Amino acid sequence: MNDFPIVNVGICGLGTVGQGVWKHISRSRAKLESRLGARLVLKRASVRDLTKKRSVRVAKSRLGDDPMAVAKDPELQIVCELIGGTTLAKDITLAALRMGKTVVSANKALVCEHGPEIFSAARQHGGHYFFEASVAGGIPIIKALREGLVANRFGRIYGILNGTCNYILTRMEREGLSYPIILKEAKALGYAEGNEALDVEGWDTAHKASILTYLAHGTWVPVKSMLVEGITELTQADIQYARENDYAIKLLAVIQRDLKTDALAVSVAPTLLSRAKVLANVNKVYNGVSVTGDVVGETLYIGLGAGQDATASAVISDIVDAIALLLRGNAPLPEPIEQNCPLNKPELIEGSYYFRLDVKDEPGVLAKIASVTSKSKVSIASVQQRPSPRKGAASLILTTHLSNEKAIRATVTNLSRLDAVLTAPLLLRIASFDD
Ligand SMILES: NC(=O)c1ccc[n+]([C@@H]2O[C@H](COP(=O)([O-])OP(=O)(O)OC[C@H]3O[C@@H](n4cnc5c(N)ncnc54)[C@H](OP(=O)(O)O)[C@@H]3O)[C@@H](O)[C@H]2O)c1
């Protein structure tokens, strides 16, 4: 063991994830070292506040408050960026890569917003950038796409990529409570951030969808070019409809590729998913991803999408890969696997839809609604009337046959203009994924 080569690792950020990495490497160092044939030394770490109490013991001599000093330390071969955000994190990532180091990160926002610049710096200076923990926490989905499924072109990838939303939706379904009540509890339990918008409005899922799209199809899709909707407007009426019709409502990222034209469609939206689908039964803070390849067929991945231990598991796997790469040169395949599939405009995305709208409970309303939908060439598949909490109103739930976002958007706008429609219609997608 003493003859093993030494690999020095630095960790920028000892928060939730950083402390998890430190804890688990400290616990399983001997096992990792004997498998790697290397000594894995956690040489130094940085934090913002040196006085903060930590759950791991780090010698004073190894802890500082200057992440850039860690990034540029010539003795470190591997730097873990576990700070988060896209400013300081980007600076230290680029500084380390420009010195030819390997950087390991869990930062989806950074990969999504600055991936091309970061990958190019890694290539140019002979370093590497690993980011397994950035999508679906402990699930090795990036490794699966990059390595295990390399023989495939991917017609469809869809998944639950945000544990906070899945937790809220699961509790709405199981306990019949409203979205605001569960959100408040989720914050108290630490499952939702103080500022929850990134999660519940779908942007965190969109960041992860962007990374998966790049890995699977070689196209960077900025989140603003995607259709992104969150879960904030869902009510028990929607949950009840889903239950009665054998659906679950999940916030799904869907990445579709037409394998004939190569055109891509990427969306994030609350979706009615048939209970027969495995992912409809992935609950609480779990994530799940379905990847369909043209060679392998459908493959499924389920696991914890966040949290200290699950995320540390992915970061440590990247550190181990980085050490294997340093010692034995077995580099991962270069990206992108595919070349720049074109992105369809979001308005061309096709599917079936669900509308819920509160309307005046009076004769002739249905006829007015039917006239609006037929003008946009949207064909109604079913209509249900339910009691509304509003006096003198009824709740209507409509589902459609196959349509597209453009026609559906026009329908929503025109329905909102009707006197008889009392609130903005809520729109859900209905997944029609074939087996
Ligand atoms: N938490 C999860 O479950 C999870 C899951 C997947 C991915 N991730 C990603 O992992 C990364 C880290 O997340 P986290 O939850 O561990 O965050 P966190 O708990 O907020 O920890 C961030 C760490 O960075 C340090 N830091 C922040 N700003 C700094 C500054 N200006 N200068 C020096 N140090 C600074 C903090 O220092 P102090 O401790 O002194 O404040 C802290 O140690 C993020 O990119 C996140 O998106 C997290």
Image: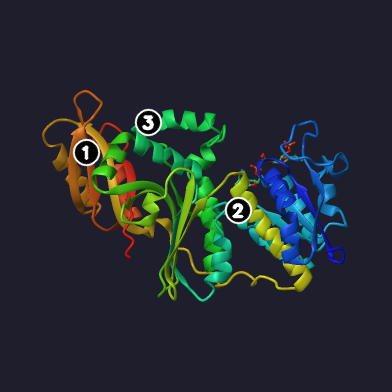
* Image position, residue 199 (x, y; %): 51, 42
State the CA–CA distance, disc 1 to disc 3.
19 Å
* Mark sitting earlier along the chain (1/2): 2
Q: Which residue is mark 2?
A: 134
* Residue 367 picture quarter: top left
Report whether the residue tagged 2 is closer than 8 Å to ligand 1: yes
| Mark 2 neighbour density, 10 Å: few (under 14) some (14–19) many (20 or more) | many
- The amino acid type found where label 3 is placed reads Ser
Q: Residue 178's mark?
A: 3
State the CA–CA distance, disc 2 to disc 3.
30 Å
Residue 422 in view of the camera? yes
Instruction: Give the label, 1 or 2, closer to the camera.
Output: 2
- In the rendered image, the vertical position of residue 200 relative to residue 344, given as above or below: above
Q: Tag 1's secondary structure? A: strand
Q: Which residue is mark 1?
A: 396
Q: Tag 3's secondary structure? A: loop
- In the rendered image, the vertical position of residue 367 relative to residue 259, given as above or below: above
**Relative to 373, is 297 on the left or the right?**
right
Q: Nearer the viewer, residue 407 or 313?
A: 313
Q: Nearer the viewer, residue 299 or 355?
A: 299
| Mark 3 neighbour density, 10 Å: few (under 14) some (14–19) many (20 or more) | some
* Image position, residue 153 (x, y; %): 47, 73
Q: Tag 2's secondary structure? A: helix
* Residue 14 picture quarter: top right
- The amino acid type found where label 2 is placed reads Ser
Which quadrant of the rendered structure holds the C terminus?
bottom left
Report whether the residue tagged 3 is closer than 8 Å to ligand 1: no
**Relative to 304, is 75 on the left or the right?**
right
Q: Are marks 2 and 3 in contact (CB under 8 Å)?
A: no
